[in-house]
Amino acid sequence: MLHLLFTGGTISMERDERAGGNVPTHGGAALVALAPELATVGPFVIEDWGRFPACHLGLDKLWALRDRVAALQRGEGLETVPDGIVITHGTDTLEETAYLLSRTLEPAVPVVITGAMRTTSDAGWDGPRNLTDAARVAANPLSRGRGTMVVFNGEILAGHQAVKVEATALAAFAAPHAAPIGRVHHGQVEFAGPPPVAAAALCPPSLGARVAHVPMVIGDTGHLLELARATHDGVVIGAFGSGNLPPGAVPAIQRWLADGKPVVLASRCPRGLVTPVYAFPGGGAGLVRDGVTPAGPRTPGQACMELTITLSAGVRYGA
């Protein structure tokens, strides 16, 4: 039995001429009726959790969604634990939700997130294919132990690696720091390898930490960093290249560190990692030596979610 959890997003939308654009319209039953091949995958139940644009999902709603999925994985209120859980979600912040679920849920019961880039009003609506493919992945026995995944345009991505790389194209998601872990081809689920050894799940009581994201600009003097320091618990900096930034921003970073607040250094480049090899003022080597933490294989958005999760769980940086 699959559990289909509908949260809204473009997959649920159609064009409203009075509103002047696309708005959430369809609930789970309507979407299932528009995806006739879904019935061939196996039995399922429908839950309308919400009908939100992705950009309306703040940290409180995301944590409520996470808790709901965790309860489903335990079989709470159900006759049996589902074989898999499918979540429809708006694409704008799908990567943050996928990262959150990947880091805070146990991997045994697969969770598959999908959505659409076109609405029911558009030619070539991709909702039925993505929803059906996601159900196929969630129902596949080889998905057990893989945790959270994103299924989009026929590709299967690990939840903590999936990134929206296209604003409007159907092939909107990729894994810029890794590779797809599989695909759905002619209705068949194909994985590239066995399930990986999962990292231990973190379970903070909520997402209470306040994390800022400050991208660097040419000639940056740290003004925005200084403003954010008074109101946030940590910061992710979107640096140039392999982790470099204007030297004028360094004093503000040092004040964050002196306050005991973590500073994470990510790259604005779509691919590649922060590599602290430059020792000039503002270079990554000096920043890391001062106590800044490289983001690893994460985009700035993923690094923000990682820092929010870990700080909320009480993890200390630089201790």
Image (spheres, rainbow, N blue to C red):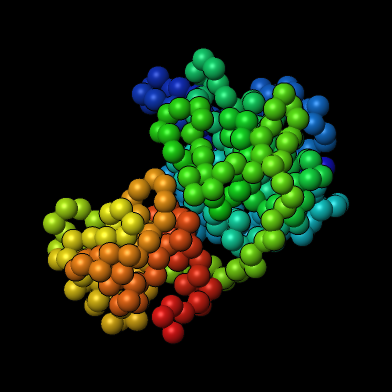
At 62% from the left and 31% from the top, the residue drawn is 154
At 55% from the left and 57% from the top, the residue drawn is 100
What is the x, y in percent for residue 264?
37, 66
Residue 243 versus residue 317: which sits nearer the camera? 243
What is the x, y in percent for residue 61?
52, 54
Query: On the picture, is 233 further left or further right than 253?
Result: right
Query: If the image is split into quadrants, where does the C terminus sit?
Result: bottom left
Query: If the image is split into quadrants, where does the N terminus sit?
Result: top right
Q: Find residue 213 and report its image quarter.
A: bottom left
What is the x, y in percent for residue 14?
50, 24
Residue 277 versus residue 180: which sits nearer the camera? 277
At 40% from the left and 65% from the top, the residue drawn is 294
In the displayed structure, would residue 52 be above or below residue 184?
below
Residue 72 visible in image:
no
Q: Find residue 132 and report its image quarter.
A: top right
Residue 52 versus residue 293: which sits nearer the camera? 293
Residue 318 visible in image:
yes
In the displayed structure, would residue 191 be above or below residue 96?
above
What is the x, y in percent for residue 103?
59, 61
- From this viewpoint, which residue is outermost toward the top? 123
Query: On the picture, is 197 further left or further right than 315?
Result: right
- From this viewpoint, which residue is outermost toward the bottom? 319
Q: How many marks?
A: 0
At 20% from the left and 53% from the top, the residue drawn is 217
